[in-house]
C-alpha cells in the first residue's frame, strides 16, 4: 500500500485518542455500500462495538439514534459526488461523529464533507493493494488493532501487500472458467447470486451492479442460510446461480447449498475460496484476502459475459442520463 | 391482545431487572426473520442499544462477539421446529443471553430452548392483535417502555388492539386492487418488491416467501434508496414492481422511486400507507400499525394471484419433501 494511503489511514486514527467510541456506522449506496459490508461483518465478530450498514439516503432521512460523538461513520463514493453519501457524511459530522470517507477523487464533495478523507487508486496501472477494497480493509485492520491491541491485525494489514501477485495468479487460475461460464450463461434472463458471512456484500454488488445495472440481467442476492427458507423453491432445470463458497465460519452454510441445488439445476457455479492459492498468506488473514480475490474472479466472469453478450459494461440507459 | 400473551411478554421483562443490557439480536430464518426486521429498525432509531438481525444458521456458525449476558436474543419459528432457529436460541442461552422466542406451538423445541417463550395465535378465527406480528410488536413496545420510560410506548401497545377492526376495513378497501393486480400480473415471470425503513422486512418476505417459495415466481427485494444505484437499470416496459410507500421517515425515498419508475414501466404498483384508514390511531403508533396492515394487503394480493395462476400457496416442491 502506498505511503500516502497509509498516512491518511493513520491520520483518521488520531481522532480516536480522546474519545470513547461505542458505535461504527457504514453508509454508502449500491456497489459502494457493498464494499463496506465486510466492515460491519468484521466488527460484529471481532469487537463488541455496535456496527451497522445503511443505505446513505436512509441514513440521511432516518438517522440512527446512536450516531453521535461516540460514533465513527465510514462512507465511500468513487467519484465523491454521490449526493446521498455526501449528505450522510455531512449529517454524521454535524452529529459529532468521526467521519472517514473513501474516494478516488481528491477535493470532491465527499472529500470535503468528511473530517478524514482517504484516497484509493483505480485503473489497470494501480497496484492491487491500493484499490478501494484493500485500502478500506487497511483502515479496518488499523481500527481493530486500536480497539483490541491484538497484533494479528498488524499481520493482516501486511498481507494486503501480497494482493498484486495474488491477483495475477488468481486471474490466470480462473480465466478459462470465466470464459466458459460466460458462454454457458450468455442467454439467461436471470442469474441469482449466493453468499454468506463476509462474502455477502460481494454477491450483493454482483446482483445489483454487475448484473442488473451493467448487463440488464434480472438478479437477486440470496443469503446461503436463507436459500432453504423460501428462495430454493425457484431452483429448477437451467436456473443459474453463482455462489462464493467461504473458507470462513459460514462455509457450512454454503456447502449445504452446494449439496442441494445441483440435484435440480445444472447451472450452479461455485467459486470455492479453498481453491485460491493462499499458501503464502498467514492463516488469520486468509478469509479477508479470499474475500477480496473473490471480487477479482467475479469481475473476470462479468467482463467475459459482457463480451459474449455484446453488452458493454459502460452502457447505462438511465444512470447519468436521466433526472432522478 | 389476549391476557396469556401479555403475561408471557411481561414474564420476559422480569429477566431484565438485574442486568445491564447492551445489545439486542434478532435471529430466525426466511419469513420469520422478516417478521423480526422491524424490531432492529425500531431499536436502532429509538434507543442507543446495539441491534442486529441475523439469519439463524449464520448466527449458529458465526456468533457475533457481543452475544453474552448483556444481550437479549429474540427468535421466532411458527412451528417451533426450525432447526437453525432452535440451535441459535440454544447457543444464545449458553452464551448467557436473555432468550425470548415466539412460536405458535407450545412445547415445541423452540419453546423449550428459550428461557422466555411467547405464544401467538394463528388462523382465520384468531383476533388480528394476537397474530405473530402484533404480539412481536407488543414485546418491542414493552421493551422500549422499559429502556426509555417514555409513555408513548404504552400508547403504541394499546393501539395494537385496534388491529382486528383495521384489518377488516383495510381488506375491504384493497380487495378490488388485489383482484385487478392479480389479473394484470398473473403471467409475469418475475416481480420485484421495493421498500424502505420499517417496511423493508415485509418486502423481503414478499419476494423470498410469497413469490419465490409459494408461487415459484422469480423475485428480488430492492431497497428504495438502492434502486437508483444499480437495480433501476432493469426497469423497462412491463417489468412489474410492488412498493410499499411509507408514512415514516423514509417516505421521500419511496416517493423518488414513484417519481421515476412509471416513466419506463406501466407496472409499478404502489401501496401508499397514507391511504390507510388510520384516523382513529394515535400519530405515534401510525407507522407501526401501517407496517402491519401493509402485510395484510400484500397477503390479499398474493392470495389473489395464487387463484389466478391456479398455483396453491400450500404447494412446495422441495420444502418438507426433500432432505436438505
Image (tube, coloured by chain):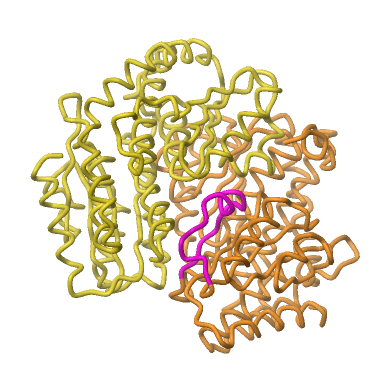
Chain colours: A yellow, B orange
Residue at 17% of width from left, 30% of height from top?
A: A127
Asked if residue B278 lies in the magenta stretch, the reply is: no
Queried whether the magenta region covers residue B52, the answer comes back as yes
Percent x, y of residue B117: 74, 71
Q: Where is residue A109 in the image (x, y as percent from the top left)?
A: 18, 52
Question: Which residue is drawn at the image coordinates 60% and 67% (left, top)?
Answer: B73
Location of residue A273 (image quadrant): top left
Residue A120 placement, left or right of B220: left
The answer to which image quadrant residue A324 occupies is top left
In this rendering, position of residue B139 left or right of residue A92: right
Which range is magenta? B50-68
Relative to the observer, which residue lies in front, B23 or A300?
B23
Please report the residue visible at 17 percent of the width from the left and 59 percent of the height from the top.
A12
- Where's the C terminus of chain B, which quadrant? top right
What percent of the width, then of the height, locates residue A164? 22, 28
Identify the image quadrant of residue B72.
Answer: bottom right
Nearer the observer, A293 or A114:
A293
Instruction: Reply above or below: B175 against A229.
Output: below
- Residue A62 vertical placement versus B116 (above, below): above
Amino acid at each position: 500500500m502506498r505511503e500516502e494511503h497509509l498516512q491518511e489511514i493513520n491520520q483518521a486514527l488520531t481522532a480516536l485518542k480522546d474519545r470513547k467510541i461505542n458505535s461504527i456506522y457504514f453508509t454508502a449506496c449500491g456497489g459502494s455500500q457493498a464494499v463496506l459490508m465486510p466492515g460491519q461483518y468484521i466488527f460484529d465478530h471481532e469487537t463488541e462495538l455496535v456496527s451497522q450498514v445503511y443505505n446513505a439516503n436512509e441514513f440521511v432521512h432516518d438517522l440512527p439514534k446512536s450516531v453521535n460523538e461516540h460514533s465513527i461513520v465510514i462512507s465511500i463514493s468513487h467519484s465523491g459526488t454521490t449526493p446521498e453519501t455526501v449528505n450522510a457524511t455531512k449529517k454524521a459530522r454535524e452529529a459529532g461523529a468521526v467521519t472517514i470517507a473513501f474516494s478516488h477523487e481528491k477535493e470532491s464533495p465527499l472529500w470535503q464533507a468528511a473530517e478524514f478523507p482517504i484516497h484509493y487508486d483505480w485503473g489497470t496501472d494501480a497496484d492491487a493493494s491500493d484499490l478501494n477494497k484493500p485500502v478500506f480493509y487497511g483502515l479496518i485492520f488499523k481500527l481493530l488493532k486500536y480497539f483490541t491491541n491484538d497484533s494479528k491485525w498488524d499481520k493482516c494489514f501486511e498481507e494486503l501487500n501480497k494482493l498484486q501477485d495474488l491477483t495475477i495468479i488468481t486471474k490466470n487460475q480462473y480465466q478459462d472458467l470465466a470464459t466458459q461460464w460466460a458462454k454457458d450463461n450468455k442467454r439467461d434472463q436471470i442469474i441469482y447470486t449466493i453468499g454468506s458471512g463476509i462474502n455477502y456484500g460481494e454477491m450483493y454488488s454482483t446482483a445489483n451492479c454487475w448484473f442488473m445495472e451493467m448487463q440488464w440481467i434480472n438478479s437477486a442476492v440470496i443469503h446461503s442460510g436463507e436459500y432453504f427458507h423460501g428462495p430454493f423453491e425457484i431452483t429448477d432445470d437451467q436456473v443459474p446461480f453463482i455462489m462464493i463458497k467461504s473458507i470462513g465460519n459460514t462455509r457450512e452454510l454454503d456447502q449445504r447449498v452446494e449439496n442441494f441445488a445441483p440435484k435440480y439445476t445444472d447451472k450452479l457455479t461455485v467459486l470455492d475460496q479453498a481453491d485460491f492459492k493462499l499458501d503464502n498468506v498467514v492463516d488469520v488473514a486468509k478469509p479477508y484476502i479470499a474475500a477480496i480475490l473473490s471480487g477479482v474472479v467475479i469481475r473476470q466472469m462479468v467482463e467475459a459475459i459482457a463480451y459474449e453478450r455484446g453488452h458493454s459494461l459502460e452502457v447505462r440507459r438511465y444512470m447519468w442520463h436521466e433526472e432522478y
